[in-house]
Image: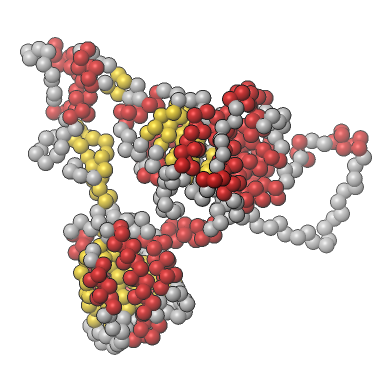
Amino acid sequence: MSTSEDTWLRAATALNLLAVDPVGLGGLWLRARSGPVRDRLIEGLQALPLPLRKIHPTIADEQLFGGVDVSATLAAGTVVEAKGIIGQPSALILTMAERADAGLAGKLALALENHTCHSLILLDEGDGDEEQAPPALRDRLALHIDATDIAWQDTTDVALPKADIDAARARLDTIHADDTVLKHLTQFAQDLGINSLRAPILAVRVARVHCALFGGDEIDEDDLRAAVQLVYALRATRMPEPEPEQQDDMPPPPPDKTEGEQGESETPEDFQIPEEVLLEAVKASLPADLLAHLAKQESKAKTPAGAGSGDKKKGNRRGRPLPSRPGQIDGTSKVDLVATLRAAAPWQPIRRECSPRGTHLHIRAEDIRIKRFEEKSDRLLIFAVDASGSAAFSRLNEAKGAIELLLAEAYARRDHVALVAFRGDSAEILLPPTRSLVQTKRRLAALPGGGGTPLAAGLKSALDMALQARKRGMTPTVAILTDGRANIALDGTANRSAAGEDADKMAKSLRSHAVDCLVIDMSNRPQQALKQLSETLLAPYVPLPRADAQRLSSAVSAVLSD
């Protein structure tokens, strides 16, 4: 695990490398919260040989790529085009990069591919692995720095003298990497589970720039160590497997060559990069919770789309603004006046010549542009809790404690919660959708345990509530907490075989209605029946043997967090 001081030294090195070759390295992904540490790192960007231009996740296409200057066009009587930010060489600083959508990421990625005069700095303020800058942009940037744990007392001046930066920039073209370096860095990237071919290419570029910056003539171990730390560390998904031990019957090594023979037969292919050095460099900068991070990524991959956050809805009344589109004035849509004038401006000379109205402004129906917005619906978290006798014998009290912890988090996010309990021969809605934390805790504390396990009835009740919530514009998610010992059928009879069939039918109904679910196994030992239920629901399965309330809460939060 790297210390705060070591991380700061790597961050300072990354900024100096970027100052030498901002375009060749693509840019920098800086993950840090707003504060004095990030401010000092941003100050180091002043050494870049490109002008700094800040952009935001909701920037319009006209600002990026240019378009018609409406005011200048109307004043001049001829079309006046304005240059966009992409049309000028610059270092683009994308603030709140974790909020950038796929559309903006694609446009910026295309700009980095087609233009050889831009560099991109992602300022990522995301919290956790769920909030990160788009992978399409991160993959194109050589330098990755996570400054979230850097202490202010460990920070020092970042930039090297301008003369050193200029000298390194002049030496860069004289430093080359042979095929052996490329081969070994590519193989090492594969060993670390890095699938992108850009990673080894960028690593070679970083090694060359590092060599030029520190006055070297050829790439050495220090340059390779810096390259793998800055390029590979945050991209790694696994650690390389140890090489198998050599067998005793392996043929003996060839005899040592004389000094003359070595000089004649030595080729670049004989050069071996010490991979143990590279591996130690990666380990030094890997996050301490790498295994937990990979486990969370795996559970996220199994989570149905939309789980943990409200669905996106497009409209023309409220929400996050989107680019306007052609439309009609129908009394309900909002007209984007600026976009409408911009669409009409190029046609004004022709329309004035063909119209008896003369020099007036001519707006046609095809010029109308309608405002669009995107909003997220409220999320409803439905707890379907098994309150049967077998569940009470297991860990019903611990499940109650976990739900109370989740309720506090849901209250902080302003989510709606609902409580469905199934026991005896039926299911009961203890609490309809609400945001009242006190009322939910009161109903939960009064939940008794005992009787049979009507799992199918609980699933049916949760499905009915989810469909009603969806009609009201909410996004439902069902968290099922049970021990899996279903023994009561939908008709209320005690028949274990029929109860299992009914539960399977209700699970398929939930899946057909695309209701996001999560199955939490409350039993003392993982139940195969609940695992099959989760597969039917296409839902994550979380077995929690010997788990207390805090661990149960953490597991559910990891799957359903925003």
Q: In this image, 205 relative to 455: left or right?
A: right
In percent of width and height, residue 435 lies at 23, 63
The residue closer to the viewer here, 546 or 490, is 546
Q: Quadrant of residue 222?
A: top right
> Where on the picture, by quarter, is residue 341?
top left
Residue at 47% across, 77% down: 546
> Outermost residue, front direction?
153
Foreground residue, 212 or 114? 212
User: How are the residues colored?
Assistant: secondary structure
Say which residue appears at 82% left-offset and 58% top-offset.
250
| Residue lying farthest to the left in this orientation | 356
Q: Give the residue drawn at x 19%, y 42%.
A: 316
Q: Quadrant of the C terminus?
A: bottom left
The spot of residue 419 in percent (x, y) is 26, 72
Q: Can you tell which quarter of the image residue 211 is in?
A: top right
**Residue 220 visible in the current orientation:** yes
**Front-most of 441 and 475?**
441
Q: Is any atom of residue 113 visible in this view?
A: no
x then y, percent, for residue 367: 18, 27
The answer to whether residue 292 is above or below residue 28 is below
Q: Nearer the viewer, residue 356 or 279?
A: 279
Residue sitting at x 76%, y 36%: 268
> Residue 133 vs residue 222: left or right?
left
Q: Is residue 188 left or right of residue 93?
A: right
Q: Quadrant of the N terminus?
A: bottom right
- Percent from the top left, x then y, of residue 59? 32, 34
Q: How many marks?
A: 0
